[in-house]
Amino acid sequence: MATTASAAELQAELIQLTADAQTTSYLAAAALTLAIVEFIGNFQDEVQLVWKSPLRVSNGIYLWIRYFSLITVAIYTIFTFREIKSDHTCRSFLLAEAVTSSLVGTSADVILVLRVWVLYGKSRRLLYIFVPFLIMEIIVEITVGVLTILPLGQYFHVGPAILGCYSLNVPRYFTYYAVPYSVTSFVMFCMTLYKCGLALFDNRTVKMPLMTLFLRDGLFWFLIIFALSIVELFVWARGRPSLAQLMVTPWTILNATVGARILLNLKKVARVEVYATAPTANLFSEDSWVRTANTLNI
């Protein structure tokens, strides 16, 4: 009887693991498809604002986050649909996934911080705060990812029924992986809301489409990151260990996609030559923002 019960439990566990593996693979494929569709839809803007513009730092940031994320997500997706027969291969892949997804996430946060830095007039004092902040973020993310993966001693290799790499002993402290990005997003959103809100209020009799766009992009970014963080925290804290990779690919691609899109918006703004501004503006008027953006060679 005990043997029969154990066999039934093992069968149920394998069925559940198979379902989780398929869910992870399909979600990764959906995220990659979304990235490709978004890339095609915005390629004309990319050509005009990046490929046909002079060589600038912002172009390098854009190309890095756009194409590095596409390549890494494509590799993630391929691995989730492959039968991996070696624990060593699984460990190497997951370590690479942790490092590259952290790089993509921090690269997106560089764009987010860049926006706020420009919004605050390229304050050197803020730069001294932002740079160490980003360095600590990437260190914490990679450390949490590596310390989560290294203890994993055994992965499931049961043939083509379960593709990819899955372990049932994922440490729960992987939950903290999303915390630094959430903190950065929240702080940058609050700073954006404060500066744009004051500027819009101070110039409430004048239309300020630039500040409105800037605030809209900041709100959109924050809501995306907030929603992703909630899902990630729930999955990693309460979900089955076999679902630990569920949100990695969607999180990576959405971070990169939103970051690239907002950087293109920023470059569009910097190319505009004339803006309507309030004659009595005493905060951060639109023309001053454009001058700041242009001096940054965006």
Image: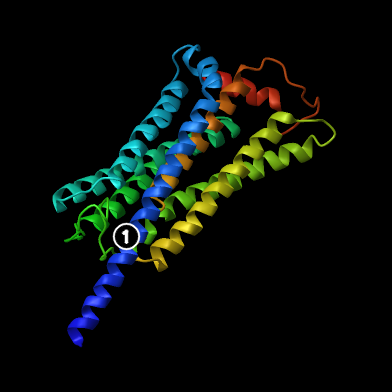
Residue 66 rendering spot, x and y as whole percentages:
43, 30
Asked whether, in this view, residue 138 is left or right of residue 52, the answer is left
Q: Residue at x 42, y 25 (%)?
A: 63
- Secondary structure at numbered mark 1: helix
Residue 296, x across and y down, in percent? 52, 22
Q: Toward the viewer: 141 or 124? A: 141
**Image quadrant occupied by the N terminus:** bottom left
Extreme-bottom residue of the structure: 1
Q: Quadrant of residue 152?
A: bottom left
Left or right, 19 with respect to 272, comes to left
Q: Is residue 108 left or right of 275 when viewed as pictured?
A: left
Reply above or below: 263 against 138: above
As rendered, which of 109 and 120 lies closer to the eye? 109
* 164 lies above or below 69: below
Q: Residue sitting at 31 percent across and 63 percent down? A: 17
Question: Residue placed at 36% from the left, 47% from the top?
Answer: 136
**Residue nearest the viewer, comparing 29 with 296:** 29
Q: Position of residue 203 (x, y in %)?
A: 79, 34
Q: Nearer the viewer, residue 19 or 247?
A: 19
**Label 1 amino acid?**
Thr
In the displayed image of the protein, which residue is found farthest to the right? 205
Query: Where on the picture, by quarter, is residue 268?
Result: top right
Residue 96: give x, y in percent of width and height.
25, 43
The residue to which callout 1 is attached is 18
Using the image, determine if residue 84 lies above or below residue 151.
Answer: above
How many residues crowd around disc 1 within 10 Å: few (fewer than 14), some, or many (20 or more)? some
> In this rendering, does residue 129 appear at all?
no
Q: Residue at x 54, y 18 (%)?
A: 49
Q: Is residue 19 visible?
A: yes
